[in-house]
Image (cartoon, rainbow, N blue to C red):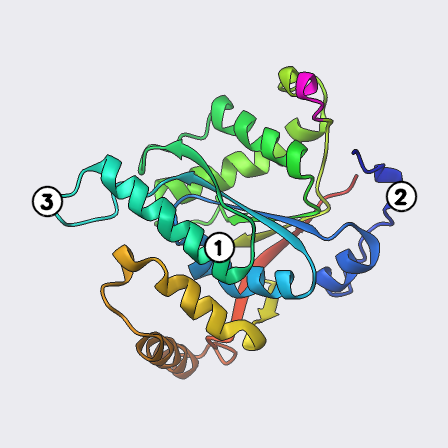
Amino acid sequence: MTTPPASIAPIDPKLDLLDELEAKAPMRALAIFAHPDDAEFTSGGTLALLVQRGWDVNVVVTTSGNKGTKDPEVTPQYLAGVREEEQRNASAILGTHEPIFLGFPDGYVHDDDELRGLIVRQLRLHRPELVITWDGFRPGFNHRDHRNTGRATYDAIYPAADDHLYYVLDKEEGLEPFRPQAMLLAGTQNADYHVDITPVIRKKVDAILAHVSQIHGRTAEGTMKMWEDRAKAAREAGDETASPYRESFTKVLLRR
Ligand SMILES: [Zn+2]
């Protein structure tokens, strides 16, 4: 089941990343985020677009978002169940596989060897050429779970997942070392890669609205209007290309 790395030609940094990956590598992507709804808000359009273009896309969520409520009657156990179900519904709308939950409590994601090992296992299992995750190195205020999920993913990819002496028990399950070709970091400060999500914008909106416990009765029309207004304000403030119809990332190429 292992794809020999030697068969993949290097990705040309000057050409479009998705076009290059589609031409040169197996079309497999893995999104790794912290909470149910992170993937949809940051990359829902990109994930839907990948599926539309024939990619095999999996989503890993490190927590089940079990602190995401202001309702004093709701227990974390109950909320985890609700939010996992919402994530499954959102993933079905985008066309990705059933989401994988690592089960850490919301707000308690540590950038440690345990999380890194669990992510290494997912990389060796799914063998994605493209990984989409949080930018764990963005300066300034950021949610701890976002930061730690992003950093652990980075460390899982390089060097751990591709070195057989890290997390040696994976071998017993037949999981071989693996390194992806590229990462796209979401929630980033200086984005250098933009995806036009116009053809799938409605899917993105519907996938976000599937997180019913988080969106407080918002409608598709209301969501689009809010994004349009926000983009308009950003354009007036000098960001000429701001638009709800694109998602922006920092691109990282990894040599094999
Ligand atoms: Zn989040």
Whether the residue carrying mark 2 lies under 8 Å from ligand 1 is answered with no
- Mark 1: few/some/many CA within 10 Å (<14, 14-19, 20+): many
Spot occupied by residue 46 in the image (x, y as percentages of width and height): 57, 63
Left or right: 3 as drawn, with respect to 53:
right
- Mark 3: few/some/many CA within 10 Å (<14, 14-19, 20+): few
Mark 2 is on which residue type?
Ser
**Is the C-beta separation of discs 3 and 2 under 8 Å?**
no
Q: Is residue 225 visible?
A: yes
Q: Of residues 234 and 96, which is closer to you in this image? A: 96
Q: Of residues 68 and 13, which is closer to you in this image? A: 68
Spot occupied by residue 74 in the image (x, y as percentages of width and height): 16, 43
**Is the C-beta separation of discs 3 and 1 under 8 Å?**
no
At numbered mark 1, what does the secondary structure look like: helix, strand or loop? helix
* Residue 72: numbered disc: 3
* Residue beneath the point at 26% across and 55% down: 213
Which residue has dot 1 on it? 91
* Residue beneath the point at 76% across and 56% down: 21
Where residue 250 sits, quadrant-wise, is: bottom right
Closer to the observer: label 3 or label 1? 1
Mark 1 is on which residue type?
Ser
**Which range of residues does the magenta coloring cover?**
171-175
Q: Is residue 188 visible?
A: no
Spot occupied by residue 148 in the image (x, y as percentages of width and height): 44, 37
Q: Going from the N terminus, do you reach mark 3 or mark 1 first?
A: 3
Left or right: 208 as drawn, with respect to 67:
right
At numbered mark 2, what does the secondary structure look like: helix, strand or loop? helix
Q: CA distance from mark 3 to mark 2?
A: 55 Å
Whether the residue carrying mark 1 lies under 8 Å from ligand 1 is answered with no
* Residue beneath the point at 56% across and 49% down: 97
* Residue 120: numbered disc: none
Quadrant the C terminus occupies: top right
Which residue has dot 2 on it? 7
